[in-house]
């Protein structure tokens, strides 16, 4: 319990490849395709961008490539349809890819009186339902511009790199977090400003560059290995396939559906 005048602390979690084992936006690609939101051409282009993201890591170049592909992909989408698809398929797509270690940390921080904040470059329409599923207390996410109930393809706020840090600082001021006693977790070197903004930064599943940064900045290093079903937490599900296979399989799966649809049209 906080004493008079004391400030609470928080735990800030990146989402993609930190709490869940892949891109949150791409996790729903199959359902978006089945709902008629994704065309065959855009499906292949976006799957390729995701493939490069998985293989190359979440550096600035790859993240910007994925952002541009997703921005082009969602232009014209009906926002209410997107929200409906995410709500209906949330457990199907997210449950199997949540890391058990991340769930344990979220529970531990809550038990110690800290608020949990999900900070993600993915769109709020995807991040907010996932955050609610995880029991998070607040969300920082990218905001897509909407006109007449449809995404324009423009991004009014991109929660990436230094912008993440700025949003975290603004939220900390608004909610009176003591950042010196707060925690932050991310797999991506682009989140270095966010990790430096708190007293306890942690690199999750770091590649070589992120491991070097962790050593130089004095961050802890964590390895998450166990994706687990949220509705069946007592037994971990098998680990996901290798990252190189994810993008390729997604592309082939989507194209197979498209070909099947063409044959039956």
Image: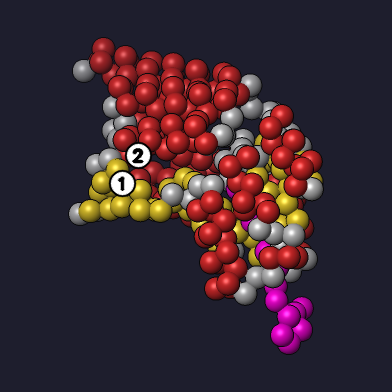
The disc at residue 78 is none
- Place of residue 261 in the rendered image (x, y in percent of width and height, measured from the top left): 28, 19
Is most of the magenta stretch helix, strand or loop?
Answer: loop
Which residue is pictured at 51% across the width and 24% down the height?
52
Which residue is pictured at 52% across the width and 36% down the height?
60
Which residue is pictured at 52% across the width and 60% down the height?
167
For mark 1, does the 10 Å Cα neighbourhood hold few (<14), some (14 to 19), or many (20 or more) residues? Answer: some
Q: Which of the 4 image quarters holds residue 5?
A: bottom right
Circle 2 is placed at which residue position? 71
251 on left or right of 260? right
Please tell me whether residue 65 is drawn above or below residue 164 in the rendered image.
above
For mark 2, does the 10 Å Cα neighbourhood hold few (<14), some (14 to 19), or many (20 or more) residues? Answer: some
Q: Is residue 105 visible?
A: yes
Please tell me whether residue 115 is drawn above or below residue 134 in the rendered image.
below
- Please report whichever mark, 1 or 2, sits nearer to the chain's N-terminal start: 2
- Place of residue 184 in the rendered image (x, y in percent of width and height, measured from the top left): 68, 53
Please tell me whether residue 85 is drawn above or below residue 245 in the rendered image.
below
Q: Give the range drawn in magenta.
A: 1-14
Q: What element carries label 1?
A: strand
73 on left or right of 186? left
Q: Do the residues labelled 1 and 2 touch (CB within 8 Å)?
A: yes
Q: Does the segment drawn in magenta span residue 5?
A: yes
User: In the rendered image, which quarter contains the C terminus?
Assistant: top left
Circle 1 is placed at which residue position? 154
């Amino acid at each position: 319990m906080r004493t008079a005048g004391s400030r609470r602390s928080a735990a800030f979690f990146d989402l993609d490849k930190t709490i869940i084992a892949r891109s949150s936006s791409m996790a729903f690609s199959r359902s978006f395709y089945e709902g008629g939101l994704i065309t065959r051409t855009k499906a292949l282009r976006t799957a390729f961008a995701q493939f490069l993201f998985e293989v190359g890591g979440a550096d600035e170049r790859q993240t910007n490539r994925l952002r541009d592909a997703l921005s082009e992909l969602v232009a014209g989408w009906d926002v209410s349809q997107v929200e409906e698809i995410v709500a209906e398929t949330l457990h199907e797509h997210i449950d199997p890819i949540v890391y058990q270690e991340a769930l344990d940390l979220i529970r531990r921080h809550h038990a110690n009186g800290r608020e949990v904040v999900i900070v993600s470059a993915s769109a709020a329409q995807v991040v907010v339902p996932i955050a609610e599923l995880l029991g998070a207390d607040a969300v920082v996410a990218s905001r897509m511009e909407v006109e007449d109930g449809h995404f324009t393809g423009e991004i009014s706020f991109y929660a990436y790199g230094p912008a993440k840090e700025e949003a975290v600082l603004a939220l900390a001021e608004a909610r009176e977090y003591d950042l010196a006693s707060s925690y932050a977790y991310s797999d991506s070197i682009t989140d270095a400003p966010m990790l430096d903004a708190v007293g306890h930064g942690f690199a999750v599943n770091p590649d070589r560059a992120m491991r070097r940064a962790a050593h130089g900045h004095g961050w802890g290093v964590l390895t998450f290995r166990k994706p687990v079903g949220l509705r069946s937490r007592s037994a971990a599900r098998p680990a996901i396939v290798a990252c190189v296979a994810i993008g390729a399989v997604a592309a082939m799966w989507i194209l197979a559906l498209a070909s099947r649809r063409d044959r039956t049209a």
